């Protein structure tokens, strides 16, 4: 009897072979390239978005708040100058306070209303703003009363009490506005110091970008060593798209920061300086007129119970109208600078998204043919 012969098992053709280490490597590289590309693009968009928000906070709100506070302060000083000039030279008796005074009061209220929309000084700024609005109403009421008393009697002595109370109100408004200006300026300084407006934030996406580039180089090395492929068109496309993303993001951030810095350090400072100079000259002229009025009514130094220091103002070299024109031009240049800073982000947002998706898609498809050669493309 013949012993049974052992037969070796024949492998079934559709049994899965042992997974290739090359296929696993390619899969991992593909996943890492896609994730790295998306991460770089996402970080680029985050940094750009935060920088845009910082630009809007500093140039779109904080700086205009300072400008409106300065404009209100300057208009207040000019209103006091115009009113006291009319009382000193007796023009109030004939024509009242005049259109220039009323325009100044309207300018104060308009600037305060705009400041309420821009206010970035928090509750303290809001409180001072409300206080100023009430004080301006009281100041105007006292000036109007003094003008009415003067027109009714033709005697400056009858108008002096209301005029003096109006001056006290003016000083309180001026002090409160000065405090409000400092609060808004401090808020602007804080927003300019935001970390998102610092140049170092580009490292948030440049560092992963460099790592992804190294990963692309590693992938190309694997393809060249194992598949004898010197160059992958899709990998090259992915590298170029990702490089364009990082480069465009960096340049837009740099350009936006440059426009904002130039606007704040140039026309913004010029507008603030002109407003302060105009306010200083107007306040000095108002003090001189007030001293002359009191000296005329009260020849003796203490006969009216006042103790005013003689004015020491120098000659006026630039008229208020010329100053106002120069200030308006400076504000217009500042607004254009901030608009240009914002435009760099809005114009490139869609481009950054498109480049990021292109890099990720090209990286995802670049290795698919090589993976399919190992029959793991769909598994």
Image (cartoon, rainbow, N blue to C red):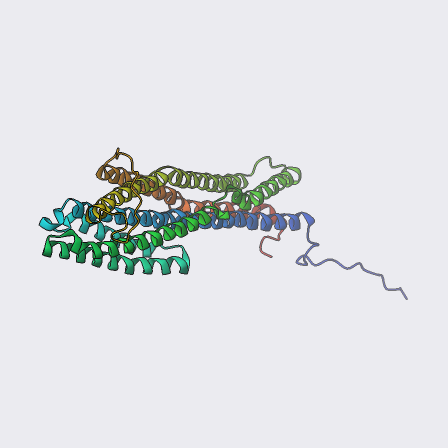
Q: Position of residue 67 (x, y in %)?
A: 33, 47
Quarter of the N terminus within the rendering: bottom right
Quadrant assignment, res 287: top left
User: Is residue 146 toward the left or the right of residue 198 in the image?
Assistant: left
User: Is residue 213 toward the left or the right of residue 131 in the image?
Assistant: right
Q: Position of residue 137 (x, y in %)?
A: 24, 59
In the image shown, does 160 or 70 lie closer to the viewer?
160
User: Is residue 103 toward the left or the right of residue 244 in the image?
Assistant: left
Q: Is residue 81 visible?
A: no
In the image shown, does 177 or 139 lie closer to the viewer?
139
Relative height, residue 280 to residue 49 (above, below) = above
Quarter of the C terminus within the rendering: bottom right
In the image shown, does 231 or 249 lie closer to the viewer?
249
Quadrant assignment, res 148: bottom left
Q: Residue at x 37, y 53 (%)?
A: 180
Q: Is residue 64 visible?
A: yes
Q: Residue at x 37, y 37 (%)?
A: 266
In the image shown, does 111 or 12 lie closer to the viewer?
111
Q: Position of residue 22 (x, y in %)?
A: 67, 47
């Amino acid at each position: 009897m013949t012993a049974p012969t052992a037969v070796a098992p024949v492998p079934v053709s559709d049994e899965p072979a042992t997974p290739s280490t090359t296929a696993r490597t390619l899969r991992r590289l593909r996943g890492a390239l896609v994730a790295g590309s998306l991460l770089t693009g996402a970080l680029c968009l985050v940094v750009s978005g935060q920088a845009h928000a910082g630009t809007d906070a500093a140039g779109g709100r904080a700086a205009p708040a300072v400008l409106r506070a300065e404009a209100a302060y300057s208009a207040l000083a000019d209103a006091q100058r115009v009113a006291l000039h009319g009382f000193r030279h007796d023009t109030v008796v004939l024509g009242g306070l005049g259109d220039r005074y009323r325009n100044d009061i309207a300018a104060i209220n308009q600037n305060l209303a705009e400041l309420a929309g821009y206010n970035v000084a928090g509750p303290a700024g809001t409180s001072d703003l409300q206080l100023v609005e009430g004080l301006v109403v009281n100041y105007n009421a006292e000036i109007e009363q003094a003008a009415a008393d003067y027109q009714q009697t033709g005697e400056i002595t009858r108008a002096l009490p209301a005029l003096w109370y109006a001056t006290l109100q003016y000083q309180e408004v001026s002090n409160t506005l000065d405090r409000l200006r400092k609060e808004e300026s401090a808020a602007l300084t804080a927003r300019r110091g935001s970390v998102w407006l610092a140049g170092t934030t580009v490292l948030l996406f440049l560092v992963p970008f460099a790592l992804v580039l190294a990963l692309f180089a590693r992938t190309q090395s694997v393809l060249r060593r194992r598949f004898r492929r010197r160059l992958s068109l899709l990998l090259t496309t992915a590298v170029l798209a990702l490089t364009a993303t990082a480069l465009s993001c960096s340049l837009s951030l740099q350009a936006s920061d440059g426009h904002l810095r130039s606007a704040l350090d140039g026309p913004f400072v010029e507008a603030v300086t002109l407003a302060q100079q105009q306010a200083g000259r107007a306040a000095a002229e108002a003090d001189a007129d007030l001293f002359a009025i009191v000296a005329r009514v009260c020849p003796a130094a203490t006969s009216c119970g006042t103790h005013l220091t003689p004015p020491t103002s120098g000659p006026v070299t630039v008229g208020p109208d010329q100053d106002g024109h120069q200030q308006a031009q400076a504000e217009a240049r500042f607004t254009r600078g901030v608009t240009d800073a914002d435009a760099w982000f809005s114009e490139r947002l869609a481009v950054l998204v498109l480049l990021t998706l292109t890099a990720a898609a090209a990286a995802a498809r670049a290795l698919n043919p090589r993976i399919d050669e190992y029959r793991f493309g769909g598994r």
